[in-house]
Amino acid sequence: MTDTYARTTTSAWRNWAGTVTARPARTESPASVDELADVLRRAGADGLRVKAVGAGHSFTAAAATDGVLIRPDLLTGIRDIDRTEMTVTVEAGTPLKRLNTALAREGLSLTNMGDITEQTIAGATSTGTHGTGRDSASIAAQIRALELVTADGTVLVCSERENPEIFAAARIGLGALGVITAVTLAVEPIFLLTAREEPMSFDRVTADFDSLVAENEHFEFYWFPHTGNCTTKRNNRSAGPAAPPGRVSGWIDDELLSNGVFQVACSLGRAVPATIPSIARLSSRALSARTYTDIPYKVFTSPRRVRFVEMEYAVPRERAVAVLRELKAMIERSPLKISFPVEVRTAPADDMALSTASGRDSAYIAVHLYKGTPHRSYFTAVERIMTAHAGRPHWGKIHTRDAAYLAEVYPRFGEFTALRDRLDPGRLFGNDYLRRVLGD
């Protein structure tokens, strides 16, 4: 019995939000690319489909399977840092939080990142995880090369120079083209960001949205439904010196208010929905203005301990304000009671086939509900607005779109599915989710 077989289990798998449960025939944790290739060949011989899973932060069943579930727990760590090319090559199962701290110790940083760091690097990039940026895009857009194991066990290195047609698609590949075992990311010398957080009215932030995006390297805001209040965050590079939040004040804002008190408020709102508008008015005024300066991952990211379900759509950036006003009007005329703020971010156009920002500057509008709260009515109403504006759903967040719709809003959709037909004609990496969003 090889080491690979020794790490085989048959336990059930659940995602972070509890929205997906999978019962694979077996779960494998290969420790090398060769072991992984062997797992794929055995699965094919046994007639079992294969899915690689990350940290389970997707709300969809993108990684669910009744065949072989591959856990990347042993495929972690930094393989190489190239200070001439300014790249880092990292194993696919490495959590973003470990990558960020390891890079910081080396005096390096990613240019941009999302606000949650629990995901693995391959899981985050494969589903299009992003932050907000005027000029810098998603984590996947920072990939310079990747290592991919295909259905027949072939190991491919893909970059702009080597297998460029696969590279163009596999950076956001939904796990449909093969199993990513390593990625090479662009990095830069570590820098400082000054974060300016302050309240702003919904009317002002929407009226000034274009200028706020244009004037700041990274701009985002949260609107609290049932109120006219928003919280804005502007992150811009700084010459320093570093001035991180005080230990006590930072704990009050990031832990006590944003997690502890918010958890209690959400629990109360779920139990007694009628209290939600009043709670929203209080919550929207709880966080005061603050400014601080720190290294990137300590500014971009924040702890998220309150569990939720989420839907997010990317719309053309020029339609963002119209969409937001429609969303606000819909909530105000409906009986819905929404306890979570609506999050708004932006990204520049990129060149990846299935990127939500493929070929167009985009605004991301994300809606959330506390875990355990019925979400179908709210999400259905939101989705109706988003799709009327050619919205593209985040691949890892709840949505109901299918291949017919997605082919209309992604100009390079056919390019991706044709590549899938070539690399995985037998659909070793298929599952119900991919059948819906990519077709057969």
Image (cartoon, helix red, strand yellow):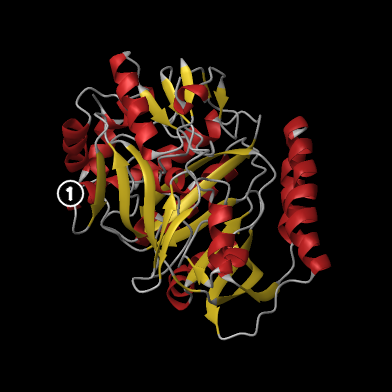
Task: Residue 237: give x, y in percent of width and height.
Answer: 52, 79
| Disc 1 target residue | 165
Q: What is the secondary structure assignment of the residue under circle 1?
A: helix
Q: Is residue 60 above or below residue 431?
A: below
> Residue, x 56% and y 20% (percent of image)?
12
> Residue, x 37% and y 61% (percent of image)?
142
Classify mark 1: residues with Cα within 10 Å, few (<14), some (14-19) or many (20+): some
Which of 3 and 119 lies nearest the eye of the viewer?
Answer: 3
> Residue, x 57% and y 67% (percent of image)?
104
Which of 160 and 246 lies nearest the eye of the viewer?
Answer: 160
Task: Residue 72: give x, y in percent of width and height.
Answer: 48, 37
> Residue, x 47% and y 64% (percent of image)?
112
**Given the image, on which type of amino acid does mark 1 rest?**
Glu
Task: Residue 433: give x, y in percent of width and height.
Answer: 38, 27
Snapshot quadrant of residue 274: top right
Q: Is residue 237 above or below residue 4?
A: below
**Can residue 351 be seen by looking at this rendering?**
yes
